[in-house]
Image (cartoon, rainbow, N blue to C red):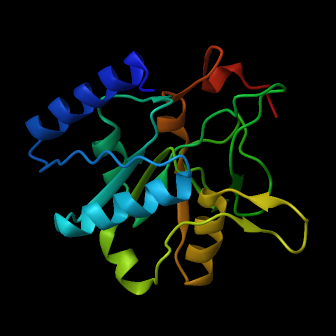
């Protein structure tokens, strides 16, 4: 299922990106297993010789300037956080110190883990990795099952890459669920 609001966001991103001079290709990778979809998207991006890959999940709404916002940081891995689609509301991912992202975070924040629903990655990173790029895992220390995005985050950090979360962009990204979960829906702190 593709949400209308997601599709409208994609159209606006593509229009604005092309007007700004970006060469944009749209890849639709489908699988009931998210990690498989992400790996298929990476392979498709590599086939088109994409310099950057922007992952946008179909349950997201994002600003039309998200490409320029994220690329403007000049970081090889940068994304946005957004609320989980469950109560109580909490942001997905963590700052480098392991604390969860909060409404008090501003600017560009180094992260230990980032969600992949709105994530920009310099394509050359995948040249230094073996397949699968994304897969689910298990955190031996906490006993937590890791989604493909946290597993990927951990793997990137092991390879020496820094992850960055644009907290200003995050304020404009919404997660579609029973309602559209917005940045300000989250509790302070």
Left/right of residue 187 with respect to residue 178 in the rendered view: right
- Residue 132 appears anywhere in the view: yes
Q: In the rendered view of the protein, which quadrant contains the N terminus?
A: top left
- Residue 143: give x, y in percent of width and height: 90, 65
Q: Position of residue 141 (x, y in %)?
A: 90, 73
Left or right for 114, reference 13? right
**Quarter-of-image position of residue 103:** top right
The furthest residue to the front: 32
Residue at x 35% of width, y 64% of height: 42
Quarter-of-image position of residue 61: top left
Residue 126, compared with residue 21, is above or below; it is below
Q: Report the side of 133 relative to 16 (left or right).
A: right
Q: Is residue 34 above or below residue 12?
A: below
Residue in front for this viewpoint, 109 or 44: 44
Farthest residue, direction top = 179
Q: Nearer the viewer, residue 72 or 28?
A: 28
The answer to whether residue 72 shows anywhere in this view is no
* Residue 146 as seen in the image, left or right of residue 24: right
Q: Say which quarter of the image contains residue 162.
A: bottom right
**Count of marks placed on residues:** 0
Question: Residue 175 at what x, y percent from top left?
Answer: 57, 28
Indicate the quadrant containing the C terminus: top left, top right, bottom left or bottom right: top right
* Front residue (pair 61, 143): 143
Identified at 31% across, 69% down, the residue is 123
The residue drawn where x is 25% and y is 69% is 46
- Give the percent coordinates (x, y) of residue 119: 45, 51
**Residue at the image point whose x is 77% and y is 48% from the top:** 100
């Amino acid at each position: 299922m593709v949400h209308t609001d997601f599709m409208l966001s994609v159209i606006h991103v593509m229009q604005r990106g092309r007007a700004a001079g970006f060469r944009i290709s749209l890849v639709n990778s489908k699988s009931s297993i998210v990690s498989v979809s992400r790996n298929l998207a990476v392979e498709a991006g590599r086939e088109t010789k994409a310099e950057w890959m922007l992952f946008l999940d179909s349950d997201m709404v994002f600003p039309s300037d998200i490409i320029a916002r994220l690329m403007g940081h000049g970081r090889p891995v940068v994304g946005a956080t957004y609320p989980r689609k469950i109560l109580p509301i909490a942001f997905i991912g963590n700052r480098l110190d392991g604390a969860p992202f909060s409404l008090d975070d501003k600017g560009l924040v180094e992260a230990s883990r980032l969600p992949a629903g709105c994530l920009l990655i310099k394509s050359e990173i995948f040249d230094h990795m073996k397949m699968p790029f994304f897969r689910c895992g298990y955190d031996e220390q906490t006993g937590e099952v890791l989604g493909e995005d946290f597993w990927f985050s951990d793997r990137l950090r092991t390879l020496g890459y820094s992850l960055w979360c644009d907290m200003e962009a995050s304020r404009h990204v919404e997660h579609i669920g029973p309602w559209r979960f917005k940045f300000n829906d989250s509790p302070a702190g």
